[in-house]
Image (tube, rainbow, N blue to C red):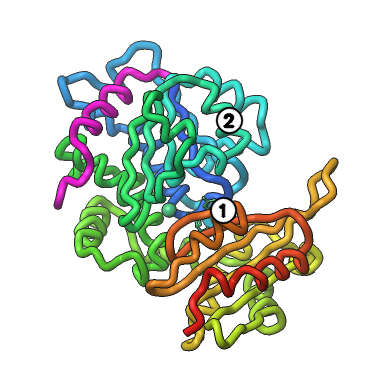
Amino acid sequence: MTQILNQEHVNQAAEWLRSAQKIVILTHMAPDGDAMGSALAMYHFLTGLQSSIFNLQSSSLEGRSGGVRVTLITPNSFPAFFNWMPGADKVCIYESAPQKCDEIIAQADLFICTDFNDPKRINPAGDKMAANPAPKIVFDHHILVPDTPLSNPQTPVLMFSLPSSSSACEVVFRFMSQLSTINSQLSTEIATCLYTGLMTDTGNFSYNSTNCELYEIVAELIRAGARKDEIYNAVFNQYSVDKVRLAGYALYRKMRIYPEYHLALITLTADELDLYHYQTGDTEGLVNEPLQIASVHYSVFMREERAKPGTTRSRIRISFRSQGDRPVNVWASEVFHGGGHANASGGEMFGSIPQAVRLFEQSFPKYIKKE
Ligand code: 5GP
Ligand code: MN
């Protein structure tokens, strides 16, 4: 396999990992399979019996006195269909324990950031992380957001980011492979977590997955114990009745097609979500559904979150998806304060669903092609 990551940076990261005592792993808001997989894989890598990986100059994690504390923090809760992931029960959720997490972040002597490079995507934890000058290692596959504490060359940051790769999990795998000859030593836990991210970020290998090396990685992960069919079943076939009915309602009653633009829009208000007892993750994947229609090449989904106490306006979360050479990230970034990949982006605005739809309808002719 091609060694794509800068080997000097890999060696430097190994040094940082070896000398750190209080490591904090962070991943992005509303964690998806890639976020959970990459963060948990690093968690297992650092806490498990993987210390042999650090055979570089015979120093090892286990060999250090005093023990090493590794904490994985997600900004908010993750969907229940990731509860089965090894280590998911160890995750600290910032939103549920902000003071405790602030303390852990303030004490950290090394940060590992996975599946994001803009600290704003993990706020308020991002600001707290930026306030701590400890070194940071990033494993990501998004275009680098400029002018952030993670993109500042003056700060100690090692950025392992391959925007052309399938997933942050692929980047983590490549990192682990370049650390030493560890493929045969990948634990089942690490392999399971990494496979989960590869699978979810490629829609079970239906997009972003033409690079043949990806299948070499899959082979390694299966060899190391990842049970691919069971992982698929655990993630995609364990939904609640409400989630499936909500998707049915959204497609039947709430999908609007703009035929000249090959565009679909689905919106769900907070009241509608209440009717189906919405839980985190219940609308995951919904934005992809309209792309099954032959004439639809762009799909947008808007979800209303009620105003938080002390605020007046709802937050509208917006997901953008497209197929082929039809980027949506500039639209997401310029109009909806977000960004992302060319074919999968996100953003937000504050206001009502009708206001968001108005902004959407005013802006799409500028950003998408009439074909
Ligand atoms: P989703 O629609 O699943 O929430 O997000 C799809 C992709 O868009 C994510 O994987 C991420 O790359 C990107 N994304 C989502 N929300 C944001 C955002 O607020 N800012 C940026 N820069 N990217 C986002
Ligand atoms: Mn990802």
Q: Name which residue lies at 54% across and 82% down.
A: 261
Q: Nearer the viewer, mark 2 or mark 1?
A: 1
SS for tag 1? loop
Asked whether 53 or 251 is in front, the reply is: 251
Using a 10 Å C-alpha cutoff, classify the residue at mark 2 as few (fewer than 14 neighbours), some (14 to 19) or many (20 or more): few
Which one is in front, 14 or 345? 345
How far apart are the alpha carbons under marks 2 and 1?
18 Å
**How far across and down, in percent of the image, does residue 273 sit?**
74, 65
Q: Position of residue 286 (x, y in %)?
A: 58, 70
Q: Tell me: 88 left or right of 5.
A: right
Q: Give the residue displayed 60% in from the left and 21% down from the top.
A: 103
- Image quadrant in which you'd find residue 11: top left
Q: Is residue 64 left or right of residue 73?
A: left
Label 1 amino acid? Gly
Q: Is mark 1 within 8 Å of ligand 1?
A: yes
**What kind of secondary structure does the magenta stretch mostly adopt?**
helix
Residue that mark 1 sits on: 338
Residue 127 tag number: 2
When asked about the image quadrant of residue 272, the answer is bottom right
Q: Is residue 60 magenta?
A: no
**Element marked by disc 2:** helix
Report the front residue among 176 and 244.
176
Where does the magenta region start and end? 1-21
Q: Which mark is residue 19?
A: none
Instruction: Say what amino acid the circle numbered 2 marks.
Output: Asp
The picture places residue 294, in percent across and down from the top left corner, at: 47, 88
Instruction: Give the vertical position of 331 relative to 244 (above or below).
Output: above
Residue occupying the point 81% across, 65% down: 271
Q: Nearer the viewer, residue 71 or 15?
A: 15
